[in-house]
Each structure stands twice: as structure tokens, then as C-alpha cells.
Image (cartoon, rainbow, N blue to C red):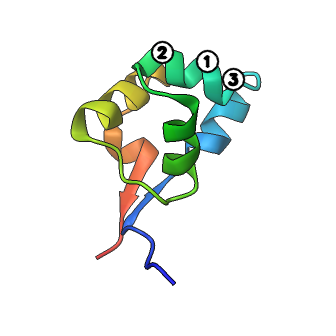
Amino acid sequence: MAKPPPITNRIRALREQQGGMSQSALAEAIGVTRQTVIAIELGKYSPSLESAFRIARVFGLGVEDVFGWQA
């Protein structure tokens, strides 16, 4: 079983707070596929630094308000 990446996120909760923003809408806003958003949300994939900043900007937050890091 693969160990999940040490990066955690609140993307799903933030999408729901934005009136139920879809994964597709977020993907389009940041320039990735819906499958990429799903993988990031599930912790199966750590986003690039650029994608992390883009996601945070969509929600009007800092990167550390969206993502956490567990050593």
C-alpha cells in the first residue's frame, strides 16, 4: 500500500463553502484536469507549487490556509 504524501489539504471543504464549486470548475480555474483535482483532494498527488498557489488564490487564501504539511 502506497504511503500518502505528507501534504494535506482542505480543498473539498473550501469548494463546499464556495457554494458547492465543482471539481471541474476548480480544475478549469487553475488550468488542470478534473482528475488532477480529485487526486490532490484525496491526497494521492501533491500539487506543483504553481498549482498550490493557484488553488489558494481561487479561494482568496494563503497557501498554508489551504494546505498543511506533516513531516
Circles 3, 1 touching at the beta carbon (< 8 Å)? yes
Residue identified by numbered label 2: 29
Q: Which residue is mark 3?
A: 21
Q: Position of residue 65 (x, y in %)?
A: 42, 44
Residue drawn at point x = 65 percent, y = 32 percent: 15
Horizontal and vertical percent position of residue 16:
72, 33
Q: Is residue 45 left or right of residue 25?
A: left
Please tell me which residue is depicted at 38% across the width and 67% down the height of the picture.
5
Q: For label 3, count other residues whose C-alpha is less than 10 Å away and answer few (under 14), some (14-19) or many (20+).
A: few
Label 3 element class: loop
Instruction: Report how far apart the C-alphas of labels 1 and 2 lie in the structure.
Output: 6 Å
Question: Closer to the observer: label 3 or label 1?
Answer: 1
Residue at the image position 43 percent from the left and 26 percent from the top: 32
Residue furthest left in the image? 49
For the residues bearing labels 1 and 2, Cβ distance under 8 angstroms: yes
C-alpha gap between disc 3 and disc 2: 11 Å
Q: In the displayed image of the protein, which residue is found farthest to the right? A: 20
Above/below status of 32 relative to 71: above
Residue type at tag 1: Ala
For label 1, the residue is 25
Q: Residues within 10 Å of mark 2 (few under 14, many from 20)?
A: few
Name the residue rendered at 36%, 69% in the picture.
6
Left/right placement of residue 25 relative to residue 51 reads right
